[in-house]
Image: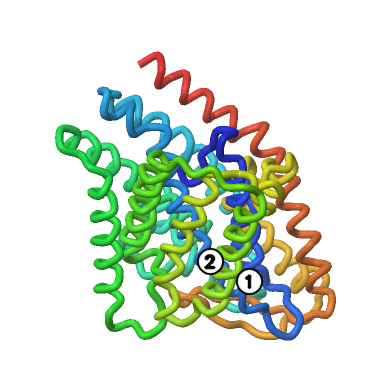
Amino acid sequence: MLFERITMKFDSLESLRGVAALLVALSHSSFLYGQQHVFIANAGVFVDFFFVLSGFVMAFAYFDKVREGMPFSRFILLRFGRLYPLHLLTLLLWVPYVLAKGYAFHVLHLGEMDPWVKNSPLRFVYNIFLVNSLGFDNDLGWNAPAWSISVEFYTYIVFFFFVLLLRPVYRPVFSLILSVLSYAALVYVARDDPHTLLYTYKYGIFRCMGGFFLGMFVYHLSQRSRIQLKAFPASLIEVALLLIACALIAESHHKAMQLPVFPVFAVIVYVLSIQDVGVVSRFLKMKWMVLLGTLSYSIYMIHMLVFVLAANIWQYVLKLPVSSMTHREGGSPFKVIDTPYADLINLGLIALVIVISYFVYHRFESIFRDSFRRLALRR
């Protein structure tokens, strides 16, 4: 799953997912000083790391079970229970915010645009049915990060029948072929777009399937590896990979530099899955880092509302200036608040997101996940 809990064998991957979730959260902050760092501005590409890791984890957890006859009803209940409850909770949390924004806009004449344009009832229905990124609409609405949950859920279904139908003849290279075909489809549909391959509400399914089945191939590859590295060479490889990834991500606002990021993510997952003695692995295996990974789904789903509320409190409650309004991919309006206190504010907001995520994970996410798991096992 996009944010499935990984066994202790892969704790470094779990932690890295948490770091990626925090970087995605920071990329959505309105608070900056001068200009947002290019690495943070491009951190949305870490969603593709989630997709690659998801394919790896799903193959680890379910490939053999599906081949051995796991019922689809049990499989989909487990996946639905992991994804949907938190998705629904965060979606419902947006309702009072949007109602308050609508009242402020129509009655108090506050705000730059009608919030019901972006957060329409129809888009709410799309989110309810997890079709918000399957090409039904021309923008993201409500909890924007949920676009990846939409494509992830339907990729699960493709995964199940891909493994089931090819069971008699399956070879690991088949998953690599499907990944390449998915990425080829993504490149094709983006052929007239000079700016990006990182589609969300349209064609995001190709982006997800490309990463997912690439991760599945990496899982098969890791199971055939018998590499025993010592600490020094492992550290060199890990640090080199992270530096390469950071360099590519910093340039990923260029369309031509986006595609190479995906295989680099796959190599990172591979390296961290076959050994854990390098300096990066050892750091990622620290308990507080693993905790970030455990909270990563809650962080990812909750952060947007926290950052949006903070920007509105700054503008309408504290009456402090907003530097400008800009637009992100898909035409989504985005406040820019230029302040010398941006780093301190962002640090505080990230801490708040982590605290809220800790509470949500223990009081909601894990409870519903376990409830659906018990239901699936009874069936």
The spot of residue 156 in percent (x, y) is: 34, 42
Q: Nearer the viewer, residue 69 or 73?
A: 69
Drawn side of residue 112 relative to residue 4, left or right:
right
Drawn side of residue 205 relative to residue 254, left or right:
left
Residue type highlighted by circle 2 = Gly
Q: Nearer the viewer, residue 12 or 329?
A: 12
Q: Tell me which residue sits at (71%, 38%) in the image.
A: 359
Q: Which mark is residue 207?
A: none
* Res 296 seen here: no
Q: Tell me which residue sits at (73%, 39%) in the image.
A: 287
How many other residues sit within 10 Å of disc 1, few (<14), some (14-19) or many (≥20)? some
| 371 vs 312: above or below | above
Residue picked out by circle 1? 40
User: Would you identify the image quadrant in which residue 210 lies?
Assistant: bottom left
The spot of residue 246 in percent (x, y) is: 59, 70
Q: Tell me which residue sits at (23%, 61%) in the image.
A: 181
Q: Secondary structure at mark 2?
A: helix
| 204 vs 3: above or below | below
How many other residues sit within 10 Å of disc 2, few (<14), some (14-19) or many (≥20)? many
User: Would you identify the image quadrant in which residue 196 lies?
Assistant: bottom left
The spot of residue 1 in percent (x, y) is: 45, 42
Residue type highlighted by circle 1 = Ile
* Res 10 seen here: yes
Q: Secondary structure at mark 1?
A: helix
On-image quarter of the C terminus = top left
Q: Tell me which residue sits at (28%, 53%) in the image.
A: 176
Residue picked out by circle 2? 44
| 226 vs 346: above or below | above
Say whether marks 2 and 1 touch (CB < 8 Å). Answer: no
The spot of residue 129 in percent (x, y) is: 37, 46
| 76 vs 242: above or below | above
* Cα separation between marks 2 and 1: 8 Å
